[in-house]
Each structure stands twice: as structure tokens, then as C-alpha cells.
């Protein structure tokens, strides 16, 4: 995850049903001190009762790089990013294969951080969901993260108002 800035500001908490595993989402942003550009984050602030992180020990980061003068995607590119996320939600989240925990957008990069039950199950569902759609310009990075370190480190950096 790109974290060039040192300050996180918490935004409005949102109650969303994008994942049965998430009870509440929140937004935050950081500002790169060298150029003033903002990175916007959306993350699970609270999990549903009974959610067991240990059952989702595989971290999968889906990345989409884009060119931008202001660091943010164009409206057309943003629409395609939303389309990708909308295709993946029923394939991996609704099936219980993974939960989307963190999304960051800015500085020419969108990253979706999922935690999955297994790499094989996640990639299988992604391939099924995307097979009838034009190719998306994404890369997928997989690693074991039983302690959810990427997510936990991000949450610890967020400054509460």
C-alpha cells in the first residue's frame, strides 16, 4: 500500500452492506507533504459480531495503476474501477471467500486489500467473475498475513478526531 503521507484524517463512518463481514466502514485521507496530493482510504472500521480474522489469513492486494496529473483517476477510469469492485463483491465477498478490508485511491494507484480464506479460492472466483468482461488493467499480489498486519498497521496510523 502506498503511504507517502504521515497524517490520516478520519472521515464520516458509513454503515454499508458491501460485505456481510463488515458492520461499519469509515473513510480517511492522507496528504503527501511533497506535492499536496490526497490519498483517500475506505476501510472496515468495525466487523460483524463473530467475524474471525484467522479464517481469512491470505492477503490479496488488487492494484490498478493509472496516469493522472492530480493523482486521482479520471471519471471514466473511476467508473471502470467501480465496475470491477461491483463484479468482485458478489463473487468473493458474498460467497464468504474473502472480505474487502481496505481501499486506497490516489497518487496514480487504486488498491483493494482483501483477506481471503485461500489464494486458490479467491483467484478462482475472480476469474469466474471477470471472464465475460473486457480485461481490467489490474495486478494481483498475494501473501500470507495471519495477523492482518497490513490492515492493522493502517488502522493504527489513522488519527481519531
Image (tube, helix red, strand yellow):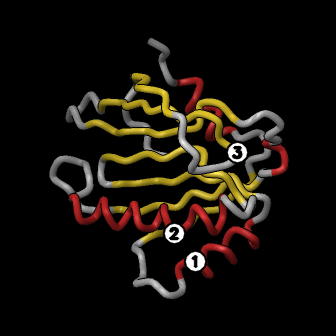
108 with respect to 156 (left or right): left
Q: Mark number for residue 21?
A: 3
Look at the numbered discs 2 and 1 and tell me whether their residues touch, using CB distance below 8 Å: yes
Measured in 3D between alpha carbons, the distance from the residue under mark 2 to the one under mark 1, in whole angstroms, is: 6 Å
Of pointers 2 and 1, the one earlier in the residue sequence: 2
Q: Residues within 10 Å of mark 3 (few under 14, many from 20)?
A: many
Q: Quadrant of the C terminus?
A: top left
Look at the numbered discs 3 and 1 and tell me whether their residues touch, using CB distance below 8 Å: no
Residue at x 73% of width, y 36% of height: 48
Residue at x 66% of width, y 52% of height: 99
Q: Secondary structure at mark 3?
A: loop
Expressed as whole percent of the image width and height from the top left, the position of residue 31 reads: 30, 30
Q: Secondary structure at mark 2?
A: helix
Measured in 3D between alpha carbons, the distance from the residue under mark 2 to the one under mark 3, in whole angstroms, is: 18 Å
Quick one: 108 or 116, which is closer to the camera? 116
Expressed as whole percent of the image width and height from the top left, the position of residue 81 reads: 38, 62
Residue at x 67% of width, y 60% of height: 94
Expressed as whole percent of the image width and height from the top left, the position of residue 9 reads: 40, 22
Residue at x 65% of width, y 41% of height: 22
57 with respect to 17 (left or right): right
Q: Secondary structure at mark 1?
A: helix
Q: Which residue is mark 2?
A: 87
Q: Which residue is mark 1?
A: 129
Of pointers 2 and 3, the one earlier in the residue sequence: 3
Quick one: 121 or 63, which is closer to the camera? 121
Amino acid at each position: 500500500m502506498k503511504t507517502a503521507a504521515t497524517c490520516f484524517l478520519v472521515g464520516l463512518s458509513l454503515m454499508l452492506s458491501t460485505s456481510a463481514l463488515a458492520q461499519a466502514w469509515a473513510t480517511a485521507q492522507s496528504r503527501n507533504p511533497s506535492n499536496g496530493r490526497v490519498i483517500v482510504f475506505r476501510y472496515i472500521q468495525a466487523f460483524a459480531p463473530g467475524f474471525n480474522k484467522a479464517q481469512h489469513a491470505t492477503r490479496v492486494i488488487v492494484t490498478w495503476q493509472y496516469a493522472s496529473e492530480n493523482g486521482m483517476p479520471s471519471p471514466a477510469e473511476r467508473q471502470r474501477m467501480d465496475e470491477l469492485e461491483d463484479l468482485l463483491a458478489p463473487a468473493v465477498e458474498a460467497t464468504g471467500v474473502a472480505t474487502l478490508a481496505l481501499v486506497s485511491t490516489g497518487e496514480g494507484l487504486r488498491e483493494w486489500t482483501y483477506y481471503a480464506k485461500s489464494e486458490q479460492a479467491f483467484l478462482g472466483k475472480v476469474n469466474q467473475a471477470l471472464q465475460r468482461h473486457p480485461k481490467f488493467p489490474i495486478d494481483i499480489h498475494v501473501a500470507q498475513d495471519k495477523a492482518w498486519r497490513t490492515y492493522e498497521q493502517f488502522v493504527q496510523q489513522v488519527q481519531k478526531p
